[in-house]
Amino acid sequence: TELDFESSLGLSQRRNVPEVTLAFRPWERHRFTLGHLRVQRSGTAAISAEVRFADQVFAVGTTLRSQLETGVTSLDYAYSVWQSPTAEVTLGLGLHRIGLEALLASPSESRSAIESARFVAPTLRLGGSAALGSRWSVHGHWHWLRHQHDEYRGRLSSYQAALQAQLSPQVAAALGVRHFKLRVDVDRPDWVG
């Protein structure tokens, strides 16, 4: 069974959620960033093909309630490869710990199935910033990863833009937006999606 949680099971493609990020800049050209976000999406749909998921088989026409929870914790290091008094370009590496938990439930049959996966994957980072004065600046960065672990294959791309206030020479606070796209393919006899 090929299963796409968005098109087959009615999960929303977009969800706005808060993200917590802490940045530390111990030296002028070096930056460490720790971040975390959690996204929970759900949907309901009648399935058009038999679905084998975990230890359950759901027949054609069954109305399924689905839920997908994604948690991402990231730790990044970035180095400023180019700097001027008002702008910089950074390159970096990071680790993303990704946790996924998927639930399929048939309310009419009072049964459900849960699968979960957790893995750590390396990321590449490209970023830049420009000063808007002595305390304010705009920042943007892009993360990318491609990973394979056992029966899981996936890729992540993330773009972020933020307005930042410098609180001290080493600490800043920012408010921004991030577009986060994660695709995970699972290839197992009881779950292909």
Image (tube, rainbow, N blue to C red):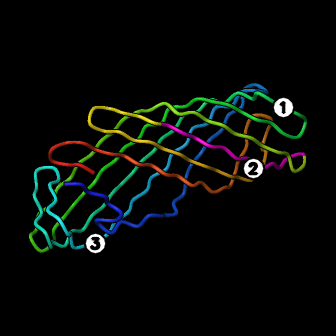
The quarter of the rendered structure image containing the N terminus is: bottom left
* Residue appearing at x 81%, y 30% in the figure: 82
Disc 2, SS: strand
Q: Earlier in the sequence, mark 1 or mark 3?
A: 3
Q: Amino acid at mark 1?
A: Gln
Mark 2 or mark 1, earlier in chain: 1
Which of marks 2 and 3 precedes in the sequence? Answer: 3
**Is residue 107 on the magenta stretch?**
no
Question: How far from the left and from the top, in percent, is residue 183?
Answer: 41, 48
- Which stretch appears magenta? 134-145
Task: Locate residue 73, reporting x and y percent.
Answer: 48, 41
Residue 91 x %, y %: 68, 31
Q: Write down the residue under mark 1.
A: 83
Q: Which mark is on residue 44? A: 3
User: Alpha-carbon neighbours of circle 1 within 10 Å: few (<14), some, or many (≥20)?
Assistant: some
42 in relation to 74, above or below = below
Q: Main secondary structure of the magenta part?
A: strand
